[in-house]
Image: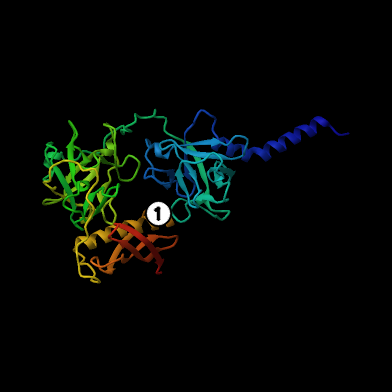
Amino acid sequence: MIDPKRITRRLGAFLVMALLPLAAAVALAAPASAQQFQRIENRWTQAQIHVQNGVPEAGATQPGWFSADWVVEPVAGEPFVRIRNRWKNQFLHVQNGSLEAGAIQTGWWSAQWAIEPAGGQFVRIKNRWTNVFLHVESGTLVAGAIQPGWQSAQWRMVGASSTPPPPPSRIPSAPPSPVPPVASSPSAPASTGQFQRFENRWTQAQIHVQNGVPEAGATQPGWFSADWVVEPVAGEPFVRIRNRWKNQFLHVQNGSLEAGAIQTGWWSAQWAIEPAGGQFVRIKNRWTGVFLHVESGPLVAGAIQPGWHSAQWRMVGASSTPSRIPSAPPVASPTPMPPGAPPSSASPAWQMAKGRCETAVFNRVARDKNTRNVTIQSDDVDGGFGGPGPVAVRGQGTYPSSNETQQFQFRCTYDPGSDRVVTVDYHKTN
């Protein structure tokens, strides 16, 4: 005779065993609405997902980094979640094809993810729209196709720091190691509002915001966009660097180098001026410890090697033009040359084309290949700055791929008349 109670018990046990992996995944990845913060750690590398440098990456993190803390938010009525960053309040998505962190629209399937059990405490994170998975099989964090056994596509959720949210300035709990006082620098001006220019030792390029963002390139004597005031921070061995034209400050508050308004307490807008020998200095950020350099062509704030001349700067006097700020900056005037003659590599015209094109190529390759580890070297210029029409800058560079360093050649068309890059093309060479 069939015992109904026995069947019910066996059926209940079977359902518990069948649903246990899914329940574990949901418990790991779908916190309650109390905004529990999680870190997402890779099984293969133990790297954690963060946006410390402005883009999604997987790497070593610090306990206090809110850039590595995430809220996994269930999508109402759906078996999917959204993954939101604690620091930037941005969401992981693939709306433009590759993995990004940014603002989203509510209905985007590209910002919705399925949390699939992968055994034990690990899960796979699968995009609803494209069915790609988060993984680090090639070393960098991407959203792409995977093989079933890849531990590089398996993640676990670990508790984030319980430290209360910091004030808006995001001041670290402890300052970095001491740096030499500003007064010891041979180039640090007094707090007189004196204008300076920052000139690179390697390229002789000067830092400016002529196009609205911090760049290093050829400048004109009348450009207030290339003039800076170095303002000591009261009672501290650090300075702020303020632009004469825009009245904006250099900072790394959002991960990469920017010029903009700041809050008084931001360590991200404070810099140590470190002697580098003779009249040269290095410019080191107080918050992140990164340095201003042009090793790959564009101006960035990043890690350096001790001997890099690309990370050494000298301060030179700015224009003595009266400090009336014009409504618009002067427009660069290309150096006159005979029609059809290529400019000298030392000329301001060549430096202008080189700087504009290297920045454009860097941004294009970095976006296409989802990496900021791009190196660029310009070779020559076709066309004359004295003649009509645009000119072409040619060169080569590298970026990391899955198995090797990928080499490429590029051609960039620059119009000196409008001071803009017209076209950017590149192709692999190995």
From the viewer's side, name the closer residue of 190 and 180.
190
- The answer to whether residue 308 is visible is no
Q: Residue at x 30, y 61 (%)?
A: 415
Q: Residue 222: where, in percent of width, then height?
A: 17, 50
Q: Residue 354: where, in percent of width, then height?
A: 27, 61
Q: Residue 326: where, in percent of width, then height?
A: 21, 43
Quarter of the image with the C terminus is bottom left
Q: How is the image coloured?
A: rainbow
| The image quarter in which residue 422 lies | bottom left
Question: Quick check: 190 left or right of 45?
Answer: left
Q: Residue 20: where, in percent of width, then height?
A: 64, 38
On screen, 62 above or below 426? above
Which residue is labeled 1 in the image?
371
- The answer to whether residue 167 is visible is yes
What amino acid type should be assigned to the residue bearing mark 1? Thr
On screen, 58 above or below 77? below
Q: Residue at x 32, y 39 (%)?
A: 253
Residue ranking furthest to the right = 1
| The image quarter in which residue 245 lies | top left
Quarter of the image with the N terminus is top right
